[in-house]
Structure formats: structure tokens, C-alpha cells
Amino acid sequence: MLANLPQLIIGLADLAAAFLFLYGLQRMSSPATAPSGILVAGFGMVAAVLASFLYVFSVSAAAQPHLGVNIGLALIALVVGGGLAWLSGKRVAMTAMPQMVALYNGMGGGAAGAIAAVELFGAKTQGATQLVVTLLGALIGAVSLSGSLVAWAKLQGVINKPLRVRGQQALNGVAMFAALATAGVILFAVLGGAPILLATPTWIYIFFGLALLFGVLMTLPIGGADMPVVISIYNALTGLAVGLEGFVLQNPALMIAGMVVGAAGLLLTLLMAKAMNRSVANVVFTNFGDAPKQVQGAIKGSLRPVEASDAGIAMRYASKVIIVPGYGLAAAQAQQKLYEFVKLLQAARVEVKFAVHPVAGRMPGQMDVLLAEAGVPYDLIFQLEDINDDFATADVALVIGANDVVNPAARTEKTSPIFGMPILNADKAKQVYVVKRGEGKGYAGIQNALFYGDNCNMVYGDAQAVLVKMIEAVRGLGAAAA
Amino acid sequence: MDLSITMTGFVALYVFMLAAFAGWVIIGHVPAILHTPLMSGSNFVHGIVVVGGLYALLNASTVQEQVIGFVAVLLGAGNAAGGFAVTQRMLAMFQTSEPVLAHAHPHAHARVHHLKKKG
């Protein structure tokens, strides 16, 4: 019985971890309970990691002489890897969150791939099923690693443009087929007990090389604005890889955690794709800009620029204002100023709400985090389906740094590339103010009929500078006006 | 008492199926406002892969296995620690209006309803 004690403790710790992960994620169903959710999930992780050191009591005979060194390496890896990631996570700016998540995600995929590599090089798998699952997990983990790193580089601005070559899809297909074929060779070589053409370890190196290459090729052509979907996909893939390696290691905690994340990533991927009015395949295999440009019907009306101060004062005397923030707001680092302005409006008894589109930002929900960081209470932040009917009763819709997500062409213009995409009905408000750097087009490269509407005024300038002027104008009215 | 876990293909498939279903249902209840912390939080959860890395490293018997095992633990630990740090930071930012502010607000009840529906 006593000999079983380490095994018992490991089993219980892993079981507790699996439960705490599920319970922690369940507590994320509300912003009020979510902080405690991540905390309990963290306890589960610590328990599982500490317990796994009890593996020292059951290591294989071959590993016995190396045990001291291995424990030392494990401690160094934990402290260095965990420490560096912890520090970077504490310091990263909220606008840089997407690339940080991509980076951590790539690390997880890499870890899963590395575990598979140990199993493959050490010929530790038993039977065809385990080998197939190991290879599958290795492929997915490696693709997730290199793909996430490319996503990181794109979001970080290291790689600026989508890189495409002629016949990109054929090339991707060849790379993937080659990786799968190599996996097949390894499978037959190991099961048959004889190397095929090359030594099996050589094939394993080739296999990992091809898988990493495929991840790079798959991600390079995808544009920066499609990254919400891509990050979701790689999150799901890493989860899947971890789950599969969990099966190989006969560790149900890894299987459950991996599969839960896989399902979560899949769900988020589908939600994002829906919000962009595109299929997942369309995001991965084509480029938005590649679609043949439709000739647009002429838009009636003209753009009417107004002064920021006038717009600010108009909102001060409105009774209901809905703000539509876009990525341009975050790019101008103007969230704090925006909330300062909102507090002035609230002090003047103006009802203010924020309307957030699902794809505002570079990852799902990033705009909500950026607003929360600026101190905006989450009960003022509304999602598309909850607020869209409110625009009709709003005196003012203030659009800052958003374009395509408020383009009414998505509702009416059948030939528009964004037709059918769910949009925020900012055009239904009595008065619309659009804060914009210039007359440029949005990501979709099309004109926005909203800007030409009779109820719309343009406020040109950097969002930060515009908001400072609005704040000054409203303050200038003084207490007498309040 | 034998405590070792041996899972045949079908038992594993059942575990996968139930976990995927649980994940789908649980995540489906997370409001869109929390999708970024959710993504980094689920990212943190697959950091459990570090446990598999530790198993591989502690059982390493060649230099090659030690090197790859070390990389697995290094990356896995980074995944877990980083995922936790950013998720905790983001979730701490979500604050509700102070009662004073909600009182000044004529439509406070509508927002409460909104949150209930989400929860």
C-alpha cells in the first residue's frame, strides 16, 4: 500500500486539477465571479505540477541513474520558463495581449510536440493506436507552435504584410501531404520493426521539420485583421495536441484539460467567423483583399466635417449617447480620455452606453478588456445583439476608430464584400459623429455610406486629440450649464 | 490496490467526448465581454501539458531525451505561468459601476436585467 502512495497522490492531484479547471472556467460566466475562477484553476495547476515530482518514485530502470540530473533540469526549466513568462505576462500592454496569448499558446503546442518527440525517439509507444495518436498530437502541436509564432510576428509587426506566392494553396497542400506521408513511413517502420530507406530517427526529424514548415506556410498568407480567428484556431489545436499526448501518457487530466480547450477554441473560432460573416475555411485559405473589387454604386451626399468642440457640446446636451469604439481608439491610446469624457457626460445626466462589435480588436473581446483597463464599468458595455435596438432611441452615436462594423452596406448592398456581416446600427441614431484620422477606407477597402448620411458629421483628427478638445469644450460650459 | 491507469481506445474516446461536451457547454455560457480572458484562461488550462513534460523529463535516460524533455517543461511552464498572469491581470480590471453612479443613472434596472440574462 505504502509503495502505491506516490501514485495515489498523483492521481488525486490530477483529478483535483481537472475538476478545478472545469469549475474555474465555469466561474467565467460572469465578470463578477471570473477572478475567483482563474484563481481556483491556478490552484489546480500548482497541485498537479507539485504532485508530478512524485514520478521520481516510479521512474524506469534506465532513467534511474540520471534521476538527480533530471530533477535539477526539471526545476531549472520550471523556474526559468515559468518565471520569464510570468514577468512578461505581468508587464505586457493590454493592446499587445493578442500576440502574447499567441506566444503562450505556441509554447503549449511546442511542449506537446516535444513530449511526442520523446515518445517517438525513445520508441516508448506501444501498439499502433498509441503510435498513431502520438504522431497526430506531434503534427498538431508542431503546427500550432510554428503557426502561433508567425501569428505573434505578424501582430507584433515583425512581419508586416501577408506573404503569398503563386500557388500558395498547392504548396500548403504539398507540405501537409508530405508531413502526413512521413508520419505514415514512421508508422510502418516502427510497426514493421525495420527502417524504410532512412533510419527511423531521421524520418522523425523530417516529420517535425515538415510539420513546422506547414504551420508557417499556413499562417503567413493570413492578414492581420483575421488574427482573432487564427488565434482561436491555434488555441483549439494546442488543446487537441495536449489531449492526444495525454492519452499517450495515460494521463486523464491532460486529456480532459486539452479536450475542454479544444472545444472552447472551436466554439470561439466559429463565433468569430460568424461575426466576420466568413467561413473558417475562407479565413484560412483566402485573403480578404484578394476578392475581386465590386464596382460600388455611387453614394449620395457629402462628408460634413465639424469641430470636435461642437460635437462635444452636442453630446453634453443629449439625453442618450451610444459610443462605438473600434481598434482605432486603442491604436490612438485614447481609452482613458474617452472614459474621462464619458464621466463628464454622466455628471451632466446623459445616459452613456458602449456598443462593442465582436471583432473590435485583434482578438475576440479585446475591446472589452481595453475599456475595462481604462476603468469603464462593465455594466456600461453592451454587445451587438443586446444594444442594436437601442440606437433608434439614441440622440447621438459616437463612432471612434471603427469603420466596417458600422457600414450599413452590410445590411443593404448585396454586391458589397461585407454584405450579411452583423453590424452595429449606428446609422439609426438621430445624430452620428464619426471620429476618424482621415477620409481613408476601412479594412474591407470600401466606402462607408454611414459617413455620407444626412444625420452624420465627421470629426477628423487623432482620437486622443479630438477627445481632449471635447473634454475642454464641455468643461468650458462650466457648472452653470450643468 | 492497483492505482495505475490503463485506458483502452474506447474509454479514451468516452473521456474525450465528455470533456469536449463539457467544454462546449461551459464556454457557451461565457459572455462575449469576457472572450479575451476566456481565451487566455483556456490557454492557461492547456498549460497542464507541463505535467506531461515533467513525466517525460524525469523518465529521460539519454541526453537527447533530457534535452527534449527540458524544452517540453520549459515551454509548458511558460504556457501555464504566462497564461495565468495575463488572465488574472485582465479579470482584475473588470469593475462594475459604484452604487452612487448606478443611482444617478435612470436606466440602471435595464442593465441589471442585461447582466442577469448573460449570467
Image (cartoon, rainbow, N blue to C red):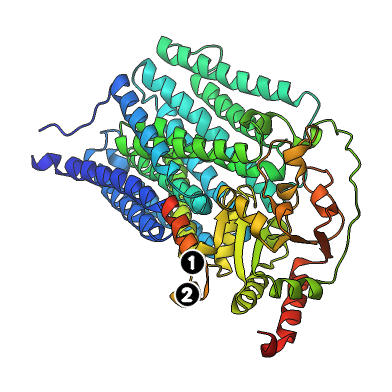
User: Which residue is identified by label 2?
Assistant: B103
Q: Is residue B105 toward the left or the right of residue A39 in the image? A: right
* Labelled disc at residue B108: 1
| Residue A346 image-quadrant placement | bottom right
The amino acid type of the residue labelled 1 equals Ala
- Tell me if label 1 and label 2 are in contact, CB under 8 Å: yes
Foreground pick, A388 / B57: A388
**What residue is shown at x 69% (from left), y 56% (from top)?**
A326
Q: Is residue A294 toward the left or the right of residue A275 in the image? A: right
Foreground pick, A14 / A226: A226
Vertical arrangement, residue A309 with respect to residue A6, above or below? below
Foreground pick, A282 / A386: A386
Vertical arrangement, residue A454 with respect to residue A446, above or below? below
Foreground pick, A216 / A209: A216
Residue neighbourhood size for the residue with mark 1, other residues' Cα within 10 Å, grouped as few (<14), some (14–19), many (≥20): some
Dot placed on the residue nearer the N-terminal end, 1 or 2: 2
Q: Judging from the image, what secondary structure is the residue with disc 1 in? A: helix
Q: Judging from the image, what secondary structure is the residue with disc 2 in? A: helix
Q: Is residue A173 toward the left or the right of residue A378 in the image? A: right
Subunit bearing disc 2:
B
* Labelled disc at residue A262: none
Whole-percent x and y of residue A387?
Answer: 59, 53
Disc 1 from disc 2: Cα separation: 7 Å
Subunit bearing disc 1:
B
The amino acid type of the residue labelled 2 equals His
**What residue is shown at x 78% (from left), y 23% (from top)?**
A167
Whole-percent x and y of residue A306?
Answer: 85, 68
Residue neighbourhood size for the residue with mark 2, other residues' Cα within 10 Å, grouped as few (<14), some (14–19), many (≥20): few
**What residue is shown at x 43% (from left), y 20% (from top)?**
A132
Whole-percent x and y of residue A73?
Answer: 39, 49
